Amino acid sequence: MAKILASKNGTKKDAITQKAAGLFRKKGFASTSMRELAESIGVEASSLYNHIGSKNELLQTLCFKVANDFTVSLTEIEKKGISTVLKLQEVIRFHIEMMLNNHDEVYVANHEWKQLQEPFLSNFLLQRNSYEGRLVEIIKTGIKKKELKNIHPNIAVLTILSAVRSVEFWQRKKNNINSKELESNIIDHLINGLIK
Amino acid sequence: MAKILASKNGTKKDAITQKAAGLFRKKGFASTSMRELAESIGVEASSLYNHIGSKNELLQTLCFKVANDFTVSLTEIEKKGISTVLKLQEVIRFHIEMMLNNHDEVYVANHEWKQLQEPFLSNFLLQRNSYEGRLVEIIKTGIKKKELKNIHPNIAVLTILSAVRSVEFWQRKKNNINSKELESNIIDHLINGLIK
DNA sequence: TCATTAAACTAATAAGTGTTAGTTTTGCAA
DNA sequence: TTGCAAAACTAACACTTATTAGTTTAATGA
């Protein structure tokens, strides 16, 4: 009868959620069984239900925690009295650091949100659209202030949001590049381009 | 007793594979059952096995078809006697057009390759690493020729390959932006940056 | 020491999984 | 019209799935 050891400053539910994040990332949500999750903890599957509500609840917790982190961060950045370019830099930097520090959770939120059940699915997409819309507004302001060239704001936002996901692949390869170098390269690329 | 109608210039296996691509994209490979796939065609699940080998074979077919298309295209571009910047432009353009013209297949190859079984999984990753390596070489050449600034080639490649995936999101929203505008915006962003 | 509670266990359920075997139907060529 | 092959069908198999009910064990506090 192994016990689920709660990580310090966290409940047992948190410990299970963390393990789930790792498995959901490696194998996908649908391909991860509760028996596998339980085994990775060292317990029977049914024992998990003393701590969590359901498998789907685990996914909900993960997705909305990540979504909320991004929303809160964007609100902070919006409030600052800095240029558009600096705001974009901070947004990009936050995305990269989230992926570096919370790899499993962010990956799962990015890849497995489709498996959310209603009404959580609609809710998640609403939050996502709102986030993208606020980034579009930042870029529109930058164009108006002539800080940015006259690109299509929606395309630019989706390009940036996709580009920062390169950190996913970067984790896969265990290159010894420190996070600051990674950050500055990606930010420079997305803001200034590749041309010499 | 409904019949599987083969699309013109294609076998019935092709028709099933195409339907599978759509479902695998919408629901994920693991969450799509053979009974669902069969129903979407209008046939019993067991009837599918008159035409295909297995569910996993469908995924293999999709993933390697896409991987091969990209490999072939890159070989063509490498052969051309054009500048590094133009080569990169053509690579980016090909990615975007593949995603626009073969949305389901490319999406599935990008998102569901993890569900491949060995030895196909290792094979796919080898092909992918080789593709990325060849792009890294193009960028290294561009730096040597002083066409490109002195960025980290590996980071640049992964940033580009991630950025072109924005087309995935773009399909989701049914904005009325034509593909040429989409292409030129993304290429300009990745080559020249955002700054005015 | 004893009662309480948290959290593990075993066992079972009902539904769904990919796949196979065997049979029947269909459409075409001779 | 008959014979044949392609391709549909039904039925079943052998597992696996998430989850629940009921029970036992371990830890805690009085």
Image (cartoon, coloured by chain):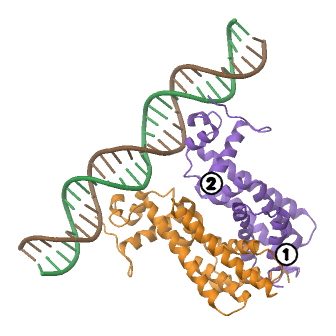
Chain colours: A orange, B purple, C brown, D green
Q: Position of residue A121 (x, y in %)?
A: 55, 62
> Which of the image's four quarters has the N terminus of chain A?
bottom left
- Report the front residue among A162 and A26: A162
| Left or right of residue B76: residue A91 | left
Is B117 placed above or below A152 here?
A: above
Query: Eyeballing the image, is A79 above or below B53?
Result: below
Q: Secondary structure at mark 1?
A: helix
Chain where mark 2 sits: B
Along the viewing direction, whichever of B31 and B52 lies nearer the viewer: B31
| Residue B98, image quadrant | bottom right
Q: Quadrant of the C terminus of chain A?
A: bottom right
Mark 2–mark 1 distance (CA, rounded to whole Å): 40 Å
Percent of width and height locating residue C11:
27, 48
**Which numbered marker is on residue B141?**
1
SS at mark 2? helix
Mark 2, residues whose alpha carbon is within 10 Å: few (<14), some, or many (≥20)? some
Point 71% across, 56% down: residue: B106
